[in-house]
Amino acid sequence: MSYQIEPWQLRWHGLAVDQLRRTESTFALSNGHIGMRGTLDEGEPRGLPGTYLNGFYEEHDLPYGEAGYGYPEAGQTIVNVTDGKIVRLLVEDEPLDMRYGQALEHERTLDFRTGTLRRRTVWESPTGRVVTVRSERIVSFTQRAVAAIHYEVEPADDLQLVVQSDLLANEPIAQQTNDPRVAAALDAPLLSDFYVAEGTRAVLAHHTRRSGLRMAAAMDHVLDTPEGLNCSISAEADLARFTAAVDVPAGTCLRMTKFLGYGWSAQRSTPALRAQVEAALAGALQTGWEGLLAEQREFLDDFWEVADISLEGDDELQQAVRFALFHVLQAGARGETRAIPGKGLTGPGYDGHAFWDTEMFVLPVLTYTLPEAARDALRWRHSTLDKARERARVLGLQGAAFPWRSINGAECSAYWPAGTAAFHVSGDVAFAVSQYVTATDDRDFEATCGAELLVETARLWTSLGHHDRHNGFRIDGVTGPDEYSAIVDNNVYTNLIAQRNFLGAVAACEQHPAVASQLEVTPDELDAWRSAAEHMAIPYDELLEVHPQSENFTRHAVWDFENTPEDNYPLLLNYPYFDLYRKQVVKQADLVLAMHVRGDVFTPDEKARNFAYYEALTVRDSSLSAGTQAVLAAEVGHLELAYDYLLEAAFTDLHDLHDNVHNGLHMASLAGAWTALVAGFGGMRDHSGLAFAPRLPLPLTEFTFRMCFRGTRFRVSVRREDATYEIVSGDALELRHHGEPIKVKPDAPVTMPIPPAPSLPRPAQPAGRDPRRR
Ligand code: BGC
């Protein structure tokens, strides 16, 4: 049983109880503020129910066997908040429960254009009563605090139907953690502050025990039923229930729309939160169900106009790419100065933490498709600057050290070598700032947030690095993106990201001298940044003619791939870290990622040699890698291999390649599908001016991607022999096509020939680690 292949929908026929945990993730709805897993309306059977509010977490002790200076003491875990999705049905005296009776038909559909999750079930009760249930669920992109469910039941015969609509807090769920302290913190994490029920409306308000955050959830109902409706409502601390009973003659229908309002705050009082969610409900009721649907459609029409990728020749990939874009949109659309977690709001995986995944994988997609969302995510980083400054101070450093993983901006990584030492995260934030400002020319953001982020992260690097006797600027003792190497010297990726950080900080200070003086940037400091950038140490192995990903890396023993059984991947779960650290084995693209994001400092020959070298060492024990490997494979001319990596990135979640989709989707990998297409086969780079080098991979007969740059929306259609650039709206653009400057004016598409791709032998991957096939 699997998904039906359709261009604009993800559809699943049949129930498959054992697959529910997985499909609850893929069918999750979110607007970046509220997240709802794709559970069945009636709540059971279920896999792992979850409703999340971005930024709403509980705190707990971080476990350490041995103490050490600078270890973060408190962890944060996203909370499964009050569940408003539940709508139960009693058919005569039998509860609709699909484990009993018979599902004559059952399908669920996530629709990328309407932005809703639909369900249609024809259910026969154990005693032979038949009802058709249709529901449609929405988490609104336009009304950030609002979700709604439209629920319809049509009996085959005259039947009495009872619908119960719940708000349920502290839903008991299987804990995902092995740590009893974390489990205890998450067992019934919500303490009741207030409850009320009146008419068709109820509100529950709670707070968390330790993080002290408050939340409220409210529901209201609009019914359309045959005569004789009998309603009641009740509320207690953790449960509010609206009940509607009515006799429904055959050929007629019971219709109910449930409107939900959610809010949380670290500061607002319970009455203020109640007012907030009631106001959200009032807005939703005023708009009405049809109005919410229309707004959602309009929002998505606009998104697809700027973001869609259409493919001819691979229908399954077409679906996967739109699925990926839809979920990336859902993760970031209305986060509004909150983080974009590694799993979005689709599941409790990674405790709901945000990582560098956001800046290096997700934000590039949003920057070129929904720039406001990228800006807001960077504003979140800006809002956490004080915590990052404090973290730097604790570590004896200057400027700002952003956390490896966090919900509220404070470091939550208990693991030093792959957490604290992964300082590149601060350079990644700076990278995303520069990329966003270049792509949008948003000088206002640069002045109010961007410059400060660039300056404080540049300060971190000056205190982390030093000029050695030969005047090279070294950054020693850090962990790069490849977490199978740790505490290394001069990681090329880190140094190049720091170099760009320095230059970005200098440029921002020159652009905004008043901001620079407010931040007390001195001319000496600017000179120090320029000099560090100019003399940045970039190790090179003259003998092998490749870049070691960090100093001496290429001198380490190569991992014994031949004798590593396939079942022993991911290696981190089967071998001691010390052994991984001292050998040449790469968890995920590191130098290869450097060649993408800092492609301006590598020659084409270096790229080809480095790529082949690291292909033989990279095991992709993380879902972040395939998209990047696709980009470089395409650039150096391995189109077929690039396509295979694109497929792996695009199908990571739909095919559950890492066997953990039940915990939530992999946002970086979904974003990686876009990157593989746009930066890989489209060859899009923005090192100095927007450039493309499109090539069509073999299975496709054409593909078209869209994006926006400085307010201009445009599309690029790629065929085997040529590519066409066309403005959708906005001003003319100056671009490069395979190195040749072109100007694209509105209403004047430009078609350019595509030079033939070099033909190179396909590089080998470690035994058994070639890209996952369909
Ligand atoms: C990767 C990290 C990543 C994290 C969250 C890990 O497996 O190695 O780079 O940030 O997952 O996606």
Image: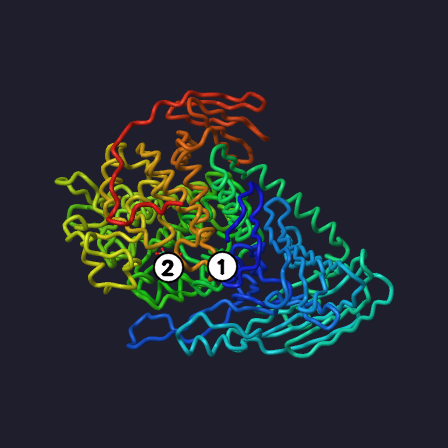
Image spot of residue 531 (x, y percent):
27, 44
User: Image height check: is 503 above or below 254?
Assistant: above
Please state if 558 lies on the left or on the right of 33 as rendered.
Answer: left
Residue at the spot 54% in from the left edge and 77% down from the top edge = 188
Q: Amino acid at mark 1?
A: Arg
- Kind of element beneath mark 2: loop
- Kind of element beneath mark 1: helix
Q: Is residue 245 visible?
A: yes
Image spot of residue 200 (x, y percent):
77, 68
Q: Quadrant of ligand 1?
A: bottom left
User: Image height check: is 269 above or below 425?
Assistant: below
Q: Mark 2 sits on what residue?
A: 401
Image spot of residue 774 (x, y percent):
40, 45
Which one is in front, 353 or 469? Answer: 353
N-terminal label among 1 and 2: 1
Q: Mark 1 sits on what residue?
A: 22
